[in-house]
Amino acid sequence: MISRIRINRFRGIREGSLEDLKQLTIMIGKNGAGKSTVLEGLYLVSVCAEDFDVVRRVYKLDYVVNRRGGRGAWDIDIDRKLLWYMSEYEQPIEIQIDIWGKVFRFLVLDLPKDKYPVRLVDKSGSLIELKNGLVWEDISAIPLTRGVSNELLEVKKFLEGILLIDALLMRRLAEVEVYAWPRLLTKRGDKYLIEMIKEEFEPDAEGLTYIPITEGSNYLVLQTSKTSIKIDDLGDGAKSALVSAMLILAYKPTVVLIEEPELHMHPAGLYTYMRFLMRLSKEFSFQIIASTHSIEFVEIAQELSKDLGIDSTVLYLERDSNGVLAARKFSMDDYDILKKLGIDIRLLSKF
């Protein structure tokens, strides 16, 4: 589990850190505070172990560049340089994460994709590309020695398990289905999925299958005793929960990064979705780091974390005019006290 994140020179963050992250960590704050940048920073770090996003079928570096505006690519100099704070690309972007109580430092270099620009700094100062097991010295690379430490192998496996779920992915159901469905069927994870659907959403659910609806197009549908319902036509809460669960069961993540899960969702649907997600988190031991603008989401998380016995925290993020990120930590008890005082934690910058 990630317990600490430190970011330097990435997007609008010149420097800053988040401390004492839990199994469920919720980030709140004004627009532009840095919440999405933290999620993207963790996704970017995973490039060191795997540069291709197998769900979206894109290179992760390209996705970080064009995710917000839908344009640009990493190998276009001017596009990638905009990821550096104030475009000051003379120094690398630096992201440190604490895993298992140990600090791992990563550098993002101003280099094309084929040079594998995201590298781990080892204790000797060498730059390691985990994906292909290479140590970089200046512009050349040599293979790691055969006696690669178990720690490096564990870090690689951990980074490979970082999964980003954002609104763009939730709208690309066909890509999720193509990735997840065959992997679920291989070990009959669909049976587990149906059990969860029956318990949380549709007691009459019997199965999931593909059916042809238009010529040349197959759709994943939920089967009940009376009909079949396209996944596309489910309510937002049920659809988000089902798609996320498919991804998680197929991907087997170590960390799930979720951006604004409340979008287009009624509080009742949000409750169902988060209960579903947090149950999976507890059963399969992965961490959830989420950003939100929703006070309902915070309240739902508070209730569910107590019910399910999941350690959780709320971090209020602020970023000053010099690009320094700071975070105030709130336990769920702290949140209750502020609520009783009539203070909305989304408005802490006003106090």
Image (cartoon, grey):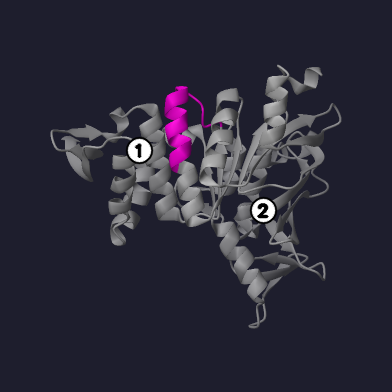
**Which dot marks residue 137?**
none
On the image, the x and y values in percent for residue 190 come to 29, 51
Quarter containing the N terminus: bottom right
- Left or right: residue 242 versus residue 79 is left
Is label 2 in contact with label 1 (beta carbons under 8 Å)? no
Q: Relative to 159, does residue 234 appear above or below in the rendering?
A: above
**Which dot marks residue 200?**
1
- The disc, 2 or 1, on the residue closer to the chain's N-terminal end is 2
Nearest to the observer: residue 303 or residue 26: 303
Q: CA distance from mark 2 to mark 1?
A: 29 Å
Q: Residue 207 is drawn in which quadrant?
A: top left
Range of the magenta residues? 260-276
Quarter containing the C terminus: top right
Nearest to the observer: residue 196 or residue 174: 196
- Residue 294 seen in render: no
Q: Residues within 10 Å of mark 1 (few under 14, many from 20)?
A: some
On the image, the x and y values in percent for residue 314 come to 68, 36
- Left or right: residue 196 versus residue 78 is left
Residue position for label 2: 2
